[in-house]
Image (spheres, rainbow, N blue to C red):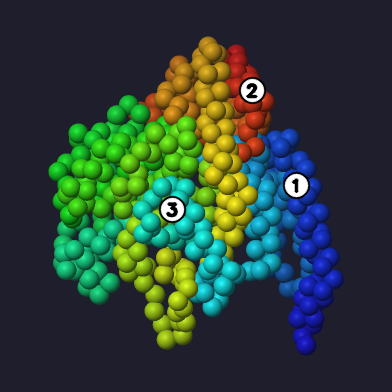
Amino acid sequence: MSKIQNRMFQDLKNKDVFKSAQEYAFDYVDTILFRNVYPTKEAIEGLSNFDEELPEKSEDANLVLKKLHEFGNSATTATLGGRYFGFVCGSAVPVGIAAKNLASFWDQAPAMHVLSPIGSKLESVVEKWLTNLFNLPKSTVAGFVSGTSTANLCALGAARYRIYDKNNWDINKKGLRNAPEIRIVMGKQAHSTVLKAISVLGLGIENIEWVDVDEQGRIIPEQIPELSNNSLLILQAGNVNSGAYDDFEVICEKAKKADAWVHIDGAFGLWAQTVNDLKHLTKGIEKANSWAVDGHKTLNTPYDSGIVLCKDNDALTSALHMSGSYIIESKQRDGMFYTPEMSRRARVIELWAIIKYLGKDGIDEMILTMHQRAKQFATAIKNIKGFEVKNDVVFNQILVACSTDEITEKVLQQIQELRDCWLGGSVWFGKKVMRISVCSWATTEKDIITTVKSFEKALEIVTKK
């Protein structure tokens, strides 16, 4: 037995390294709700301690973890807490973190049933649960990927396969050269990850037929051109800035008559379907062909957790086909046919744990609370002179601007420097705005009050300079 092999066996046996990790994790959790939302300058400067040459010799495992804890803990962004409102980043439900930690010890890769029977089983179960939660067709299948960026790629890949198949063109064998034309139709405020997917799939961004949107960023149904069975229509469940929803009921009926493929990008917004008081926003989504959604946003699973949903099993698996003499296919679920990768962790474990823990009622309550906190913030900020809410707050997104772009930028920077909360900026119809995304289970009424005070203080500082 080699020396390093013996050391690793000892680490596994005495468990000190795992105990240290648990102790550090508990220390982190004890402070996360009360600390600065963004790291201090000192903490960021402390990251220079990681600047070192590649080690020549093996080091004690406990010392490795100690360094991570000492210099890494304070340099994290507190997305787990209740006052991080940037980039539509969710927190993580405690049972999800615990399940992910347990799953880390299992270290499963559910590409094939034979690789991970538990991973395969939970993917099958959660696939049915999600179909139920979103009220999608029973034929819907799911692929568990890293995020909506990949989910959009998979769904549009399935759309590409099916459209070409209807034209007797085998994209897997013939490729794109001389292939029939695919018409891509989408609103002018589609998310950048959709553009990335179109580019990667070789469909060409210049080929997009752009459709005008209304003052909330919703695609205007009357502006959608005449569709055909060669059309790929992309809609949004939750505009990334305003949170607005396209009119799925009307648009999907129009697309269905033309036999066009409809994909819905619903990274955070598709979850409105699971809330009784909000499901009017997603009316008609079941009429689409594919959907993309994140777990790590609104459902608050730990990173990374994205889901592609498609009612055309053959199109999805054909687009993501996999073969090899060493592959062992089973009569059970082989997850590699529903995702681009073989080597991926069993992220479904924490997804299963959170849905099991919350149940339908808990999911409804948790997500509705996020909406209520967003409405609370919008109402409060409107009452402060110098701020204006620029969108209708239909879900969890609030856009706020000051009297000029210059003041908006300076106030945003000041809020970030105060570190009581964190949010980013955006551009809304040519005007700079501050974007608040409420998508943490941990956000309380008190957190919103603290955040509003931070806005007020930042504006006061800026206007006095």
Q: Secondary structure at mark 2?
A: helix
Query: In this orientation, does residue 101 appear?
Result: yes
Q: In this image, 34 relative to 408: left or right?
A: right
Q: Position of residue 119 (x, y in %)?
A: 56, 67
Residue on which disc 1 sits: 28
In the rendered structure, find residue 449 and report the number of the disc placed on it.
2
Q: Amino acid at mark 2?
A: Ile
Q: Quadrant of residue 197?
A: bottom left
Q: Amino acid at mark 1?
A: Tyr
Q: Position of residue 124 (x, y in %)?
A: 49, 64
Tell me what residue is drawn at x 63 percent, y 69 percent: 107
| Label 3: how many Cα within 10 Å (few below 14, some 14–19, many 20+) | many
Distance between the alpha carbons at the discs numbered 3 and 1: 36 Å
Q: Amino acid at mark 3?
A: Thr
Q: What is the total number of numbered labels drawn onto the structure image?
A: 3
Among the two numbered marks 3 and 1 on one chain, the one whose residue lies closer to the N terminus: 1
| Label 2: how many Cα within 10 Å (few below 14, some 14–19, many 20+) | some
In the rendered structure, find residue 131 and report the number of the disc placed on it.
3
Along the viewing direction, whichever of 388 and 121 lies nearer the viewer: 121
Q: Position of residue 149 (x, y in %)?
A: 43, 53
Q: Secondary structure at mark 3?
A: helix
